[in-house]
Image (tube, rainbow, N blue to C red):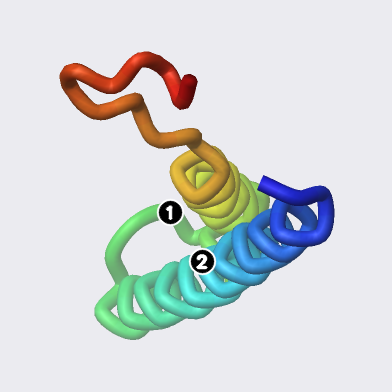
Amino acid sequence: MSHRAQAMNDFVALLFAALAFCAGFLILGWAVEAASHFRLGSPFLSEGNFLQVALALGLAVATWRRATRRPLPAAGDAGGL
């Protein structure tokens, strides 16, 4: 694989990770808003709190690792030789 193709794969992986972070942050924000509307959870629960950001970041990191993971060689393949 050429250096240019590798850079493009990393760019796409970064886009997926950014999308996962934004979607996770948005969904967790809606969950916090629903919880505060129905008076569930702590009275200190607010949008944009540390837990919401940490969970969205964890989702983004998991997505990045999944997207950049190299495929295993197929059975009977000599490792690309």
Residue appearing at x 26%, y 79% in the figure: 38
The quarter holding residue 79 reads top left
Residue found farthest to the left? 75
Residue tagged by mark 2? Answer: 20
- CA separation, marks 2 and 1? 26 Å
Residue found farthest to the front? 81
Residue tagged by mark 1? Answer: 42
> What secondary structure is marked by label 1?
loop
User: Front-most of 29 and 9?
Assistant: 9
The quarter holding residue 41 reads bottom left
Image coords of residue 36 (percent x, y): 39, 75
Image coords of residue 44 (percent x, y): 57, 57
Tag 2: Cα neighbours inside 10 Å, few (<14), some, or many (≥20)?
Answer: many
The reply, left or right, for residue 32 in relation to residue 16 is: left
User: Front-most of 63 and 44?
Assistant: 63
Which numbered dot is residue 60? none
The nearer-to-camera label among 2 and 1 is 2
First-in-chain label (2 vs 1): 2
User: Front-most of 9 and 32?
Assistant: 9
